[in-house]
Amino acid sequence: AQSVTQLDSHVSVSEGTPVLLRCNYSSSYSPSLFWYVQHPNKGLQLLLKYTSAATLVKGINGFEAEFKKSETSFHLTKPSAHMSDAAEYFCVVSDLDNTDKLIFGTGTRLQVFP
Amino acid sequence: GAGVSQSPSNKVTEKGKDVELRCDPISGHTALYWYRQSLGQGLEFLIYFQGNSAPDKSGLPSDRFSAERTGGSVSTLTIQRTQQEDSAVYLCASSSYGQEIPNIQYFGAGTRLSVL
């Protein structure tokens, strides 16, 4: 069975500093991994997806994530945080055995201070 | 519209009443998913529809929950005899299953259900 673990429930950074949101996955085979973002009172928006074509995945709004099989990690990073990045971020794995339903991590709330 | 549309955006109901939540997927998307986002449980899968196949109902928490998808498009999630623990945001997603690798699910803004 697939699962994801988000290691931090809250992350706080200052505007202009780097962002690191950590995610580890568990899967018996090559997983389909995603990061979604949820702004307050908004729907979930896809940030990026891992397709196995490249281990470094670039997403929207300057975010990227690196798939590291040896560490079973898929951490989300951004070189310089912006105030508008404040939101909840979800690391997600697709259940390839079962209709591709999504299995969500518990989420990381990112706060950005001026 | 271009995205997944859900209605109502907010619903307040009294314990014991039935509610219906609607999802209008992206045109042409054959797969439709319902998820629930609640404080205690995080985001959890409820039910999945794909074309004319029997739905995957494995995530429905009780027999008070049911869903249908008419004409392969609009879906309605029904909760009967609502309980306070049903209070949550109900999210709908759709995808063009099999046409994107990996399969990408696009989400609506959700319906916030409050059971008093």
Image (tube, coloured by chain):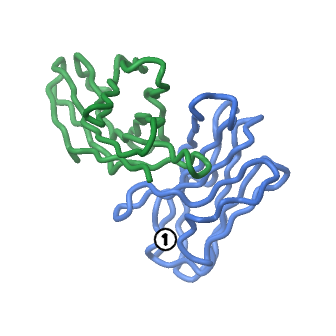
Residue B105 coordinates in the image, percent (x, y): 58, 38
Mark 1: amino acid: Asp
The colour with which the image depicts chain B is: blue
Please give the name of the residue rendered at 55% of the width and 72% of the height, measured from the top-left corner: B13
Q: Is residue A113 left or right of residue B39?
A: left
Assign the C terminus of chain A to one quadrant of the image.
Answer: top left
Front residue of A80/B18: it is A80
Q: Is residue B114 above or below residue A22?
A: below
Which quadrant would residue B17 be assigned to in this image? bottom right
> Which chain appears green?
A
Which quadrant would residue A54 be assigned to in this image? top left
Q: Is residue A50 left or right of residue A26?
A: right
Please give the name of the residue rendered at 59% of the width and 54% of the height, measured from the top-left corner: B34
How packed mark 1 is, by other alpha carbons closer than 10 Å (few <14, some 14-19, many 20 or more), is some
Please give the name of the residue rendered at 46% of the width and 28% of the height, measured from the top-left corner: A49
State which chain disc 1 sits on: B
Front residue of A41/B102: it is B102
Residue A95 coordinates in the image, percent (x, y): 51, 47
Residue B56 coordinates in the image, percent (x, y): 66, 60
Residue assigned mark 1: B86
